[in-house]
Amino acid sequence: MRWLRNPIDRLTDGLPRPWRVTIDWLVTIVGAILIVLAIKQWIINPYRIPSSSMEPTLHCARPGLGCEASFSDRVLACRFCYDIWGPKRGDIIVFKTPPAAALACGAGGTFVKRLIGLPGDTVFEDAHGYIWINGKQLNEPYVQADRRIQDVQQNPDYRNHKWVVAPGHYFFMGDNRGESCDSRKWGSVPRGNLIGKVIATYWPPSRISIV
């Protein structure tokens, strides 16, 4: 008796060999596509950095306004990480913006920014552009001094301003504060809008790193 190795062999047994080979290839291709889609949906998804709001931590491509690189960074976001542990202050996160972002920024959809305020936090930005969380100054080595000065000059409405993060919501800001349209303008983001934690930069090759 001839050994039939898998269900496809059993289903196609008796068909001409060219048909069996074609069906086997089609099943393999469809299976591979489904695996890729499953990985993107539940495990890891790639994203491109389109703007300068996270410079210089994450680069966008010139000639975009404020972009420092020839190629935009491509990053990987872990979609299941926050099913295991909660979001932490300082994480770089991919998320869906609330509707107010489209009105405030002229664009909405999927953003990549840094998590600054956790549920229940009081976020305060002082006259010099420094951030205070619940009365304690936040250490932010990822914000360059000249970009902080630019933020102070370009966004006077944020000086000495306080925001209270609602329960179940998160407050996001870009590292390039002067060029970032973020939670200071359109509010905090509900937990359900968080897509995943950025864990690595995978392109271009000179920028490969773990975040």
Image (cartoon, grey):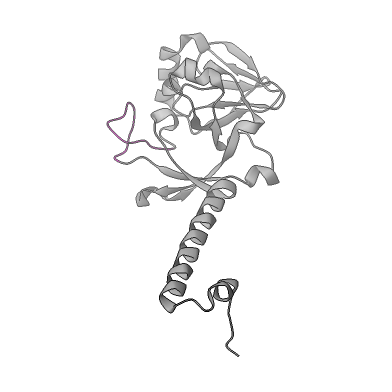
Q: Is residue 132 above or below residue 192?
A: above
Residue 15 percent location from the top left of the image: 49, 76
Residue drawn at 60 percent across, 72 percent down = 7
Name the main secondary structure of what is drawn in magenta: loop
Say which of 183 and 101 sits in front: 101
Residue 207 percent location from the top left of the image: 39, 47
Say which of 14 and 33 sits in front: 14
Which corner quadrant of the image does residue 136 belong to?
A: top right
Outermost residue to the bottom: 1
Quadrant of image for the N terminus:
bottom right
Residue drawn at 32 percent across, 26 percent down = 65
- Residue extent of the magenta highlight: 58-70
Say which of 121 and 135 sits in front: 121
Residue 149 appears in the figure: no
- Give yes or no for residue 89 being in the magenta stretch: no
Which corner quadrant of the image does residue 105 belong to?
A: top left
Residue drawn at 47 percent across, 74 percent down = 20
Residue 31 appears in the figure: yes
